Image (tube, helix red, strand yellow):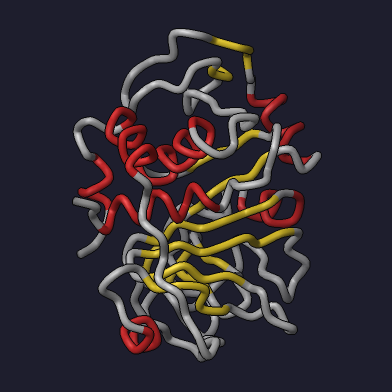
């Protein structure tokens, strides 16, 4: 039986469709790493994947397993070269995101006296300015999808983002395929209504007249996913 987590991994993998020979980087959890590896093993075989540290992998190992085939060494300086030259598609997380895809991973509350300190901007400015960027947000709530982020860490379509592809959440897939680059509801996951997504979003979404259901994995894709994640770590990451 296909689970919500299976649907989410596949929806994230679809973000890499058509990328060709660039580095696919999933950051911050099992779902994004699985998405890059699933895409490479199915519909996007030209993708480059890495071990999460400094090795380009010739094979595609299961989560937690080292690669058996190493294609190259990827020190940090070379990783940065890929970023600055648009040769990486990264899938990031966000503590806040607004309708134009500006994201915050730095602080919650007023900058002068924030309620919480988070990660800082990290590589978000360079990623969003130079490379295709997508987001995986495991809990779709109005606290995350906000009218205005408290600090811009990753830039959105209104501030010069190069190529914001999609935002995948535990409820839906969203993109920026609108005249003003604002967020649009692209599909809802099985069992989720449009009203559910609208209620969980703290700003006005563009909602098409017809909203499709996010596709589930084929039997072949599900078999690959189970081999990549035999312990089903993906289930622990996706909010019910």
Point out residue 39 in the picture as x, y percentages from the top left corner: 51, 39
Q: Quadrant of residue 219?
A: top left
Q: Residue at x 54, y 10 (%)?
A: 70
Q: Residue at x 74, y 38 (%)?
A: 87
Q: Quadrant location of residue 232?
A: top left
Pick the residue in front: 121 or 90. Answer: 90
Residue 160 location in percent, x, y?
78, 67
Residue extending furthest toward the right: 85
Looking at the rendered image, the quarter that the C terminus falls into is bottom left
As drawn, is 12 to the left or to the right of 63? right
Residue sitting at x 26%, y 73%: 191
Q: Is residue 109 visible?
A: no
Farthest residue in the front direction? 219
**Number of disc labels:** 0
Quick check: 215 left or right of 226?
Answer: right
Indicate whether 67 appears above or below 236. Answer: above
Residue occupying the point 55% across, 20% down:
54
Task: Provide residue 121's location: percent of width, then percent of height.
Answer: 57, 55
Q: Is residue 99 above or below residue 15?
A: below
Image quadrant in which you'd find residue 170? bottom left
Tell me if 230 is positioned left or right of 176 in this view: left
* Image coordinates for residue 1, horizontal then vertical, percent: 18, 51
Is 109 displayed left or right of 2 in the figure? right
The one nearer the camera, 52 or 1, is 1
Q: Nearer the viewer, residue 106 or 29?
A: 29
Could one spot residue 210 in this view of the protein? yes
């Amino acid at each position: 039986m296909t689970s919500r987590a299976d649907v989410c991994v596949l929806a994230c993998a679809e973000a890499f469709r058509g990328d060709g020979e660039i580095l696919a980087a999933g950051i911050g959890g099992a779902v994004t790493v699985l998405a890059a590896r699933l895409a490479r093993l199915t519909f996007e075989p030209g993708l480059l994947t890495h071990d999460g540290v400094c090795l380009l992998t010739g094979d595609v190992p299961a989560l937690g397993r080292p690669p058996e085939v190493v294609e190259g060494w990827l020190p940090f300086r070379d990783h940065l070269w890929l970023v600055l030259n648009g040769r990486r598609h990264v899938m990031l997380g966000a503590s806040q995101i607004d309708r134009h895809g500006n994201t915050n991973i730095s602080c919650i509350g007023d900058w002068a006296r924030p309620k919480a300190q988070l990660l800082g901007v990290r590589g978000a400015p360079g990623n969003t300015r130079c490379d295709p960027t997508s987001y995986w947000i495991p809990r779709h709530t109005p606290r995350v999808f906000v009218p205005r982020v408290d600090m811009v860490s990753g830039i959105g379509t209104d501030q010069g983002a190069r190529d914001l592809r999609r935002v995948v959440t535990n409820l839906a897939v969203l993109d920026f395929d609108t005249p003003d680059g604002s967020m649009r509801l692209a599909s809802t996951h099985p069992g989720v209504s449009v009203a559910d997504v609208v209620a969980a979003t703290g700003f006005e979404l563009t909602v098409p007249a017809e909203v499709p259901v996010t596709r589930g994995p084929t039997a072949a894709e599900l078999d690959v996913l189970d081999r990549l994640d035999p312990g089903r770590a993906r289930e622990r990451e996706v909010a019910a």
